[in-house]
Image: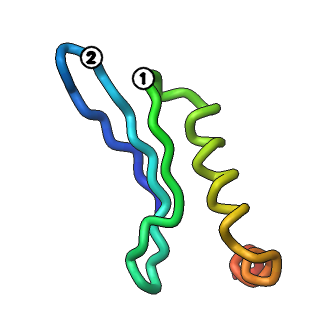
Amino acid sequence: MTDVTEFHLFGEKLYLSTMMDLANREIIAYSMSDKPKYPFINEMLDQTIAKLDSDSIKKRLKT
């Protein structure tokens, strides 16, 4: 599961994107940015793919 959360800190906005493994509720990847744009989401997705082994990715993509 993924989520993007907007925080307001010191008059500025900060965005946090996370990926959670629903099997154990572990945050397996995250990224932060001052703008909610695609590269910031893509960074989190790249981290997720790097963390998972290729067999696991293939299995998840088939479902």
- Corner quadrant of residue 11: top left
Q: CA distance from mark 1 to mark 2?
A: 8 Å
Q: Residue at x 49, y 60 (%)?
A: 19
Choose the circle earlier in sequence order: 1 or 2: 2
Quick check: 12 above or below 28? above
Q: How is the image coloured?
A: rainbow
What is the residue that sits farthest to the left in this orientation? 10
Mark count: 2
Residue beneath the point at 50% across and 43% down: 31
- Three-letter code for the amino acid on which mark 2 is drawn: Glu
**Percent of width and height locating residue 2:** 47, 58
Q: Secondary structure at mark 2?
A: strand
Could you tell me which quadrant the C terminus lies in? bottom right
Question: Can you give x and y, in whole percent of width and height, for residue 45 in the image?
Answer: 64, 52
> Would you say 32 lies left or right of 11 here?
right
Q: Residue furthest top?
A: 11
Q: Which mark is residue 34?
A: 1
Q: Quadrant of residue 12?
A: top left
Give the residue at x 80% y 78%: 58
The secondary element bearing badge 1 is classed as loop
Mark 1 near mark 2, Cβ–Cβ under 8 Å?
yes
Q: Is residue 17 above or below residue 20?
A: above
Mark 1, residues whose alpha carbon is within 10 Å: few (<14), some, or many (≥20)?
few
The image shows residue 26 at horizontal and vertical percentages of 42, 73
Residue lying at 34% horizontally and 28% vertically, measured from the top left:
14
Instruction: Check the image and report above or below for 13 versus 4.
Output: above
Few, some or many C-alpha atoms within 10 Å of disc 2 (few <14, some 14-19, many ≥20)? Answer: few
Type of amino acid under label 1? Asp
Dot label at residue 12: 2
